[in-house]
Structures are given as C-alpha cells and as structure tokens.
Amino acid sequence: MDKKYWNNYYHQHGKDQEISICSTFADFCVKQIFPKKSVKIVELGSGNGRDAIHFAHQKMSVIAIDQSTAAIDIEKKELHHEAGKYLHPKALDFVREDYSKYGAIDIFYSRFTIHSITKEEEELLLPNIYQSLKKNGLFCIEVRTIKDPLYGVGECCGENTYKTDHKRRFINSKIFLEDVLRVGFELVYFIEKNDLSVYADDNPVLMRIILKK
C-alpha cells in the first residue's frame, strides 16, 4: 500500500459529512447478511471509518484496521461519541496481523481493499482469515474486477495491476472464487456487476462475495 498517498488522501477526506454515510456494501451487509445479534467484526482497510462507524452505531464490536495513520486518527475522533465503545481503530498491516489475540471473530469485512494488495499478499491473507474466523463465521468482500472500466487504464505495474492516481490490482473473480474455495470457504453469495456503488461519474464493476467458514 502507498502509505504516503493514502495519508494525504485521508487528510483531505476526513470531514464529518464524508464519514456520516456508510457505503452501499455496508448497508447491504447489515440489512441482508449480518446475523441479528451482537457480533465481533474485523474490517480490513477501514479507511476513514465510514463503514466501521456505521457498524459501531449498530452496537457491533468493530476492530478497524488500516495502515494509514491519518485514516486511523479520523476514526479515533469517534471514540468520544456513543459508538466509541464499540469501535477499536488500529494502525496495522491487515495482511500479516495475528488475529488470534482478538478472540472469537464472527465477521471479516473488506471493501475496496483486496485490490490494494499484491497477489502474494492475498495468498497470505486468505488462509489467515480462514483460520482466524470462528466456525460459521463470514468473510464479506467487495472489490473491483477485471471487468471494471478502469481496467487497463494508466501505467501497468504487473498482472491485472494499473496505476492512475494510485495503484489497483483488479480481481479476476473466477480465479478468486477458485482460490477461496480451495482454502476451505463455502460460497454464500456472489454477484459481479455495476450499479452497486456509483460515485459521481464512477460506476465500477464490482464483485460482492460472501463466504462462510
């Protein structure tokens, strides 16, 4: 991850109005996927905390991990609010983190972060997540795929990886699905399309996938 880029980005995107509305994926997960009970969530690459804060407001315990210290500083401001007792922001590398120290984890949540790591890091992450989840726990992912309009735009930096203002590794959904099933996950939900997360003129083609241990 380009820490300098993301620290600068979150210095500019940490305003209250920008974290007050969660992503469409977070809304989808809360309404249709997450169990209707108290759960412990680990968010991988939580950014400015918009989704983690939303989960905390639902009284879900959230360990929000991001390598950007600027992003985590934004989240820490929320600790003074009511939801703060459910929010646990940490500036860490989510790929190599030892999740056993957090106890039983019900849900791992990743939005727009799998495409920020290399294929080699993904190969480290997937079994780490699987081993760290409790039985029947969920891994919820939203990510850009190779069908996205931005695929092929900018400087090629490796297989399916292109850099515009920042680097993205676009995911081949077929290969990713094969990889997670090989690790041991069961498929609960899968869709790959646009119109899932439209922002201004950007209407990405995304994979939403829900996996169960």
Image (spheres, rainbow, N blue to C red):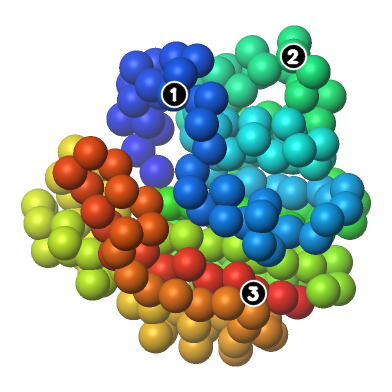
Circle 3 residue: 211
Instruction: Indicate the amino acid at tag 1.
Output: Glu
Image quarter of the N terminus: top left
Q: Earlier in the sequence, mark 2 or mark 3?
A: 2
Q: Is residue 111 visible?
A: yes
Q: Earlier in the sequence, mark 3 or mark 1?
A: 1
Instruction: Please tell me which residue lies in front, 64 or 34.
Output: 34
Q: CA distance from mark 2 to mark 3?
A: 32 Å
Task: Give the answer, above or below, for where 50 lies relative to 178.
Answer: above
Instruction: Indicate the amino acid at tag 2.
Output: His
Give me the residue at 58% from left, 43% from top: 93
Circle 1 residue: 18
Q: CA distance from mark 3 to mark 1?
A: 29 Å
The local crowd at label 3, few if under 14, some if 14 to 19, many if 20 or more residues have their Cα within 10 Å, is many
Residue at the far front in the pictured view? 31
Q: Indicate left or right for 201 with 22 as reference.
A: left
Q: Indicate left or right for 74 with 84 as reference.
A: left
Instruction: Indicate the amino acid at tag 3.
Output: Leu
Task: Give the answer, above or below, for where 18 lies relative to 157.
Answer: above
Determine the image quadrant of residue 131. Answer: bottom right
